[in-house]
Amino acid sequence: MRIVLLGPPGVGKGTLAGFLKEKYDLAHISTGDMLREEIKKGSALGLEIKSVITSGALVSDELVTKLVQNKIEHDLDLKKGFMFDGFPRTVTQAVDLDAILAKVGAPLDFVLNLDADFDVLLKRMTGRRVCRKCGALFHTVTKPTLKPGICDLCGGEVYQRPDDNEKTIQARMEVYQQSTEPIINYYAKQNKIKKVDANLEAAEVRLAVAVFFK
Ligand code: ADP
């Protein structure tokens, strides 16, 4: 399967992706993770990306699409399935992704459109904690680490993303509504949207999603 996980920040795309990766052996392509990797390198480009992400705005279409194109053309086993998480985030990115995938003969099968109420998203994001080393996701209330600040899986340091504060979250939600939501219509015209109620707990979301893989 070749799919896109679409939905507002905090809706649970990363959590679901972790599950789908194991269950259906899909490659996980997260542009947020790719951009954070670039920041970690400490390059000039990384610094530029950092200031954009911290403000809650989007990194340029050109840059993100180039990263994804590189990945697809040089670093992805196209015989296997894959899922995009956090990409595309604008209609321009969606159009470009279709073109890139058409060129390699691997068009998208469907788009999971996850949605949840604003208060649910806010709670998920403000409580979100991430392992600096392996990227595992935790939540201070619903999925705390066994030892404070230490990843259960790899022992790495668990931290709060600097863009997971209320002010930046507000900005990210506005950007989502303005720039990303129109993508739903773009894929609806292709008949590729599968709607998922992501107010539910992670296990229930998994069950709801499983029907699309049969
Ligand atoms: P979330 O889904 O929780 O908002 P991500 O890790 O997907 O988090 O993205 C974090 C930030 O990285 C975004 O707010 C944005 O600044 C940048 N980013 C990630 N993916 C893209 C993209 N496809 N286009 C532009 N900017 C992106």
Image: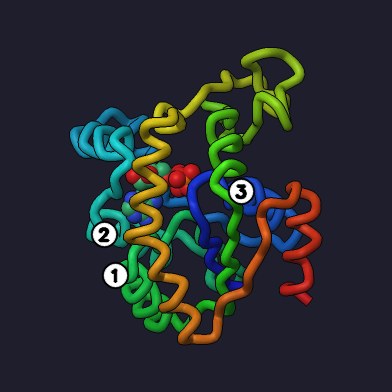
The part of the image, by quadrant, that contains residue 210 is: bottom right
Q: Residue furthest bottom?
A: 190
Q: Are marks 3 and 1 in contact (CB under 8 Å)?
A: no
Viewed as shown, does residue 89 lie left or right of 24?
A: left
Q: Quadrant of the C terminus?
A: bottom right
Q: Are marks 2 and 1 in contact (CB under 8 Å)?
A: yes
Residue 107, given in percent of the width and then of the height, sits at 49, 81
| Depicted 150 relative to depicted 4: above or below | above
**Place of residue 160 in the rendered image (x, y in percent of width and height, measured from the top left):** 50, 24
- Residue 196 lies, in percent from the top left, at 66, 64
- Earlier in the chain: of badge 2 and badge 3, it is 3
Display colour scheme = rainbow
Amino acid type, callout 3:
Gly
Q: Would residue 35 be visible to someone looking at this image?
A: no
Q: Amino acid at mark 2?
A: Asp
Q: Position of residue 133 (x, y in %)?
A: 55, 28
Marked residue nearer the N-terminal end (3 or 1) = 3
Q: Is mark 3 within 8 Å of ligand 1?
A: no
Q: How many marks?
A: 3
Closer-to-camera residue (31/138): 138
Q: Is residue 124 above or below residue 73?
A: above
Which residue position is annotated with label 3? 12
Q: Is residue 183 left or right of residue 114?
A: left
- Secondary-structure class at tag 2: helix
Marking on residue 92: 1
Kindly identify which residue carries mark 2.
61
Specify the quadrant that holds the N terminus.
Answer: bottom right
Residue 165, compared with residue 23, is above or below; it is: above
Q: Is residue 52 visible?
A: yes
What residue lies at 52% left-to-right and 77% top-to-bottom?
108
Residue behind label 2 places its C-beta within 8 angstroms of ligand 1: yes
